[in-house]
Image: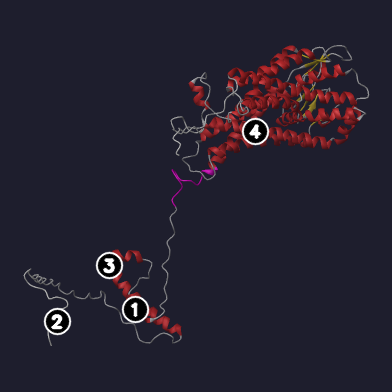
Amino acid sequence: MTDHSPDRSPDRSPRGISTEQAPAVVQGGRAAALVASCVRGATAAGLGLGALAVVVMVMWISSPYPDSGPGGALHVAAGLWLLAHGTELVRTDTLSGDPAPIGVVPLLLVALPALLAHRAARDALEPDEGRPRPSPRGALWAVTAGYLLVGGAAMVYAAGGPLAPDPLSALFHLPVVTVAAAAAGVWTASGRPLGPLPHWLPERVRVELARTRLVVAARSAAAGALALLGGGALLVAVSLVWHADAAQDSFLHLAEVWSGRLAVLLLGLALVPNAAVWGAAYGLGPGFALGTGATASPLALAGDPAMPYFPLLAAVPGEGPGTWWNWVAVVVPVAAGGGIAWFTVRVAAPRHGEREAAWGCRETALAALLGAAGCGLLTALLAAAAGGPMGTGRLAVFGPVWWLAGAAALAWTAGIAVPAAVGVRAWRLRGRGGGAEAAVVPAPVPAPILPAASASASASASASASVHEAEPEAASAYDFLPTGSWGEREARLAALKEGSGGLMAEFPPEPLPERLPLPEAEPMRMPEPMPEPAEAPGPREEREEPGASSAP
C-alpha cells in the first residue's frame, strides 16, 4: 500500500517544499551577550593579576629574609599589576622617609595585560555555537567595563601597600591601555578591515586617509621604528659584552641568594625593551638622561650621572668625550631611513612595473616624508613610555627625553628617506618608455644557404624561384629562400661539383619553363535524354500461370 501522507522530513515543509535547515537556537539575546563579554573582561584582568601574584608569592616564599607577610606580598603584586598598565607607583618605605615615585614601566610587563584584554575582546566576538554574539561596539565596551571593575578593586587594595598607585596616573593609564588592547581584539575578530572610516570624520579627512600613500607611509613608519628598536637593542648587546665584567659584578652583588638573583634576572628581562629604546635614542644623537644634569650621547657623557647599581646600566659608556666607537651608533638612524625609503619605493616604482603605473616624483617624496613623520611620532611615544622618574632629586629625570628623540628621528629619517626614495625611483625608471615598455624590434635574420644535394633538387629550386618571381604575392611567404640570377646559380653549382669529388652528375640541369602549360579542358557534353518507360500491360492481358508449360 502506498503512503500518501505529506513528507515530514527535517528538510521539507508540510507542503512538500524543500527548505534550508533552520539555524541553531540562540540562547539568550543582546543582554546575555553583553554580560558574557563583561565576564570575559573581568576574567582577563583576574588572570593577569593572578599570574603576577603567583610570581611574587614564589619570590616571597623562597626569600630567606622576607620583610612582611603574605599580605604585603599580595599588595606588591597588585602594585606591579597596575605598574604594567603604565600607572606610576609611590614607594613609601624609603631611607629618608619621603615618598619616592617609580615611573619607569618595564615594557615587556605591559605585554601581559594587553594580550589578555586583546584575547578577551576577540573571543567575545567568536562565541561558541548556540551562544549570542554581541556587536563589535558592545563587545568593546562590555569587555572594558568588566576589566576596569577588577582594576578598580586592585587599585583600592594596593593603596595600603608599600607600592601605592598614584590615583591620577591610574585613572588615566588603566582605561587607555584596556581600551586600546580591547579595540585591537575587536579589530582582529572582525577580520582586520581597513575601512570604512568613521562617518563623524570630515569628508576631506576621509578622502586623504583613503589614499594609497598614507597606507604606504604607515607601513614605512612602522618599518623605520622597528629598525630603530633593532639597532638600539644591538647597541645595548654589544655594550654589555664590552662591559661584561661590570655587568656581572653588579648582578652578583645585588643579591646573594638564588631567589634574589632570580628576581633581578626577571626584572632585567622585563626592562630589555626599555634598553632597546634607550639605545635607539643614543644612536639618534640626543641620548638619554641619567639624572638631572647628566646625559649620555655619542659625543660625550656629560654631567655627574646618578646611576643605580643594576646590570643593564653597566652598558652605559664611560665618562668623557666619545670616540669613533661611540660614533658608529649613527648607523642606526641611517638604517631606519633606508628602510622607510625602501618600503616607499617598492610601491611607488615597482622593479618590473610600467612607467605609467609609477608615482610621480612629488608623490614619492611626500610619501617618504609622511613615513618619516610617522616614525618620529612612534619614537616619541616609545621614548615617553620607556623613561620616567626613579625617585626624587637627581633621579627625577631618567631615560630619553621624548620630544628630543622624536625630533631627531624625524630629522634623520626625512633627510635620508626622501632623497633616497626619489633617487631609487629615478634609477628604476631610467630605461622605460613613455607609456609602456619600449617595443623590441627583432634583428633581421640572414637568409639560409640551402646546399644543392642533387641536380633534381637544384632544378626544383630554380623552378620554384622562377614561379615566385612571376607571382610576387604568393612568393612573399617564401622570402627566406636565396635569390639571384640564373648565372649566379650555375656558378654556385659548378663550385659545388668541384668540391664534391666527382659525386655529382656531369650533365647540367635543364631549366624549367617559367610557367607550366595547363592541360586543355575538354568541352562539357550535355547528357542524353532518358528513354520513356514502356507501358504496363493492360488488365485484359492474361498472364501465364506459373505451372503451365508448352508442349514439346
Q: Where's residue 201, x and y in %?
A: 52, 20
Query: What residue is disc 4 on?
Result: 224
**What whole-number distance in Å separates the C-alpha atoms at marks 2 and 1?**
78 Å
Q: Is residue 319 visible?
A: no
Q: How many C-alpha atoms fall within 10 Å of the one at disc 4: few (<14), some, or many (≥20)? A: many
* Residue occupied by mark 2: 549
- For residue 459, which numbered disc appears in the image? 1
Determine which of the numbered discs, if any, sits on residue 471 in the image: 3
User: Which dot marks residue 375?
Assistant: none
Residue occupying the point 67% across, 37% down: 335
For the residues labelled 2 and 1, say whether their Cβ atoms are less than 8 Å apart. no
Q: Distance from label 3 to label 2 (Cα)? A: 79 Å
Q: Is mark 1 on a helix, strand or loop?
A: helix
Report crowding for label 3: few under 14, some 14 to 19, many 20 or more residues within 10 A (C-alpha).
few
Q: In which quarter of the image is residue 194?
A: top right
Q: Residue 164 lies in what quarter of the image?
A: top right
Neighbours of disc 1 within 10 Å: few (<14), some (14-19), many (20+): some
Under circle 4, the secondary element is: helix
Q: Which residue type does callout 1 highlight?
A: Ala
**Label 2 packing within 10 angstroms: few (<14), some (14-19), many (20+):** few
* Total numbered labels: 4
The span shown in magenta is 427-439
In three-dimensional space, the C-alpha distance between marks 1 and 4, rounded to whole angstroms, equals 78 Å
Q: Residue 290: x percent and y percent? A: 80, 23
Instruction: Tell me which residue sits at (65%, 23%) in the image.
Output: 182
